[in-house]
Amino acid sequence: MNWEQLLSLKRQGDKGKRLRIEQDDTRLGFEVDYDRIIFSAAFRSLQDKTQVIPMSKTDFVHTRLTHSLEVSVVGRSLGRLVGKKIIEKYPHLQSIHGYQANDFGAIVAAAALSHDIGNPPFGHSGEKAIGEYFSIGNGQKYKDQLSDKEWQDLIDFEGNANGFSVLTSSRPGIEGSIRLTYAVLGAFMKYPKESLPKKPTQNIADKKYGFFQSDKEFFKEVATELGMIPNKSGNDIGYERHPLAYLVEAADDICYTIIDFEDGINLGLVSEDFALEYLIKLVKDTIDTSKYKTLATKEDRISYLRALAIGNLIQDAVRIFIENEELIVQGKFPYALTDKSKYKAQIDDIIKISVKNIYQSREVIEKELSGYQIINNLLDKFITAYNNNHSGKATNYDKLILKILPEKYFLEKENLYDRLLLMCHFVSMLTDGNALLYSKIINSNNY
């Protein structure tokens, strides 16, 4: 892979090449991407989607929206710091092509901003609920009518693949959704492969999948334009990662490790003394002890340590990336950056505590259980109504169900897989609150 190709400003539908040197620096294409994501309906819906605590009533717990904004800020810093080193190493990128260090920051920031845009309501349990509707629920009856890869898309429903679809899928009158640059789409692709074969290697890029079968051709177009390296054979599609995808992943890893932990502390799920013991290990080389002792409240003490911890992890991730840049560009670095961090033991300890005290807390489990039931119910009602309507067998109840379906989902889909995926997409794009509201309407005796 080469950096000029990887930094492509091309957008879906472009006939010619967009040159960096011809860009207006007051309205750079990669920054336009950020703006388009911010103003999209899918991004706004993240304000009422679970990050850690589903439907939390407290004002300091993160939602997917605040998490995404924070990941974007960390990603921008990572991108700029790496970009500065890359420009120094390959000065022709600036002198001939016009790229700047901040371009890298803008690409990573936009990709990081959208990294959770395809996640269903109720956190990761939402993905599992959709998958299990098909693997062990009423959706099992569709298996024999789908290809193996189409079926795998559904039983392993993946927020990353759904996000790629949100960002790129055309609908009547709107080609390519919000038409992001291919560089940002490449950085967004943490798992540039299809759903089968499942986890064929230990390569971090093969951990999950990154596109549905319905989006395969455009995914291949983006990967080819960027010069990403194919790593699958036969009829299977997969690539080595775009280098900047490592930074998007690192930004997410840093934020959920530290900030989810902070949420747990503020909720009282992790004691302050216990938390300090773990955070101090991350900041012992940079902490200003005299300043720390002046902080009178738990909130201020934790905030100070959180800021230092994030700063240290950013610097460490940049170091790892630059030390391995040539391997990364050659597609020969099969790890997450945090896997090679000098703080890996501390990161693992914090995640272990978060899993035990936060992610598996009673409050989280109870609300995830409710989310499972809600998603299963919505999928069953809307898929049944949509398929019955397609085959001309819709009952009056089915017709009533479809009347509450948003207008943009009034699409004729001849293919069963496309119909199932469309209804999964509809449910996945609901906020936690809207999913609950739809469920109440459908199950109301007065409906």
Image: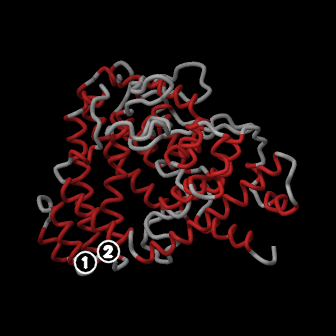
Of 245 and 339, the residue lying toward us? 339
Q: Please tell me which residue is depicted at 15% across the width and 76% down the height of the picture.
A: 293
Q: Residues within 10 Å of mark 2 (few under 14, many from 20)?
A: many
Q: Amino acid at mark 2?
A: Ile
Of 330 and 442, the residue lying toward us? 442
Residue 164: name its quadrant: top right
Q: What residue is shown with label 2?
A: 265
Q: Is residue 137 above or below residue 392?
A: below
Q: Please tell me which residue is depicted at 27% across the width and 57% down the height of the picture.
A: 310
Q: What residue is shown with label 1?
A: 272
Disc 2, SS: helix
In the rendered structure, the answer to whether residue 377 lies left or right of residue 33 reads right
Q: Amino acid at mark 1?
A: Glu
* Quarter that holds the C terminus: bottom right
Residue 218: name its quadrant: top right
Q: Position of residue 65 (x, y in %)?
A: 49, 59
Q: Position of residue 163 (x, y in %)?
A: 53, 46
